[in-house]
Image (cartoon, rainbow, N blue to C red):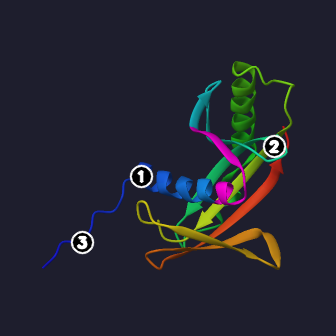
């Protein structure tokens, strides 16, 4: 009998879901600058630059299918304040404060944790511009919702 594969640790699962978000950002033409940045006592999941020069600070939230609530619902006021504080610290440290436009996005991923290094393809939902379906090489499907400008500073 073959033992079941070990489930990835919470940190590894988080990293894989962030990989999905980064793949979507690149698919949409954004340049990913950094990941998992600590600034001003807060962590920013992804820092990216949009084609128009806007710096985008992305919070990635994920849940396996069947879990309670949607992942994006977990980005409450306290979390938003931490993200803004971290983004402010990042911009000041990189001499970008008040020099570049800024946007705060949330990318929510729902579905089974993707395998490490799996190839993803994204298909936009024509009825809802925030929703992308993602298929992976291992046949698992994910639903990815991208909220551009999810909140203001």
| Camera-side mark, 2 or 3 | 2
Q: Earlier in the sequence, mark 2 or mark 3?
A: 3
Residue 94 is situated, as x and y percent measured from the top left of the image, at 70, 22
Distance from disc 1 to disc 2, alpha carbons, whole Å, reads: 27 Å
The residue beneath circle 1 is: 12
Q: Earlier in the sequence, mark 1 or mark 3?
A: 3
Which quadrant: the N terminus?
A: bottom left
Name the residue located 60 percent from the left edge and 53 percent from the top edge: 22
Q: Earlier in the sequence, mark 1 or mark 2?
A: 1
In this view, 150 is above or below 4 = above
Q: Residues within 10 Å of mark 3 (few under 14, many from 20)?
A: few
Q: Residues within 10 Å of mark 2 (few under 14, many from 20)?
A: many
Do labels 2 and 3 touch, CB within 8 Å?
A: no
Residue 12 is situated, as x and y percent measured from the top left of the image, at 41, 52
Q: Is residue 28 magenta?
A: yes
The residue beneath circle 2 is: 103
Distance from disc 2 to disc 3, alpha carbons, whole Å, reads: 42 Å
Q: Which residues are magenta?
A: 24-35
Name the residue located 78 percent from the left edge and 24 percent from the top edge: 96
Q: Residues within 10 Å of mark 1 (few under 14, many from 20)?
A: few
Residue 8 is situated, as x and y percent measured from the top left of the image, at 36, 58
The residue beneath circle 3 is: 4
In this view, 60 is above or below 38 = below
In this view, 20 is above or below 151 = below
Residue 68 lies left or right of residue 138; in this view the side is right
């Amino acid at each position: 009998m073959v033992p079941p594969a070990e489930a990835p640790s919470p940190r590894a699962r988080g990293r894989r879901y962030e990989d999905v978000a980064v793949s979507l950002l690149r698919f949409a033409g954004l340049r990913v600058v950094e990941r998992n940045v600590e600034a001003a006592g807060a962590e920013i999941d992804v820092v990216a630059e949009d084609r128009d020069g806007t710096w985008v600070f992305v919070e990635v939230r994920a849940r396996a299918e069947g879990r309670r609530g949607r992942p994006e619902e977990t980005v409450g006021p306290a979390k938003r304040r931490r993200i803004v504080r971290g983004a402010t610290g990042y911009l000041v440290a990189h001499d970008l404060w008040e020099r570049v436009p800024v946007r705060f996005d949330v990318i929510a991923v729902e579905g089974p944790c993707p395998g490490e290094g799996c190839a993803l393809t994204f298909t936009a939902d024509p009825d809802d511009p925030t929703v992308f379906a993602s298929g992976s090489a291992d046949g698992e499907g994910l639903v990815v919702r991208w909220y551009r400008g999810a909140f203001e500073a």
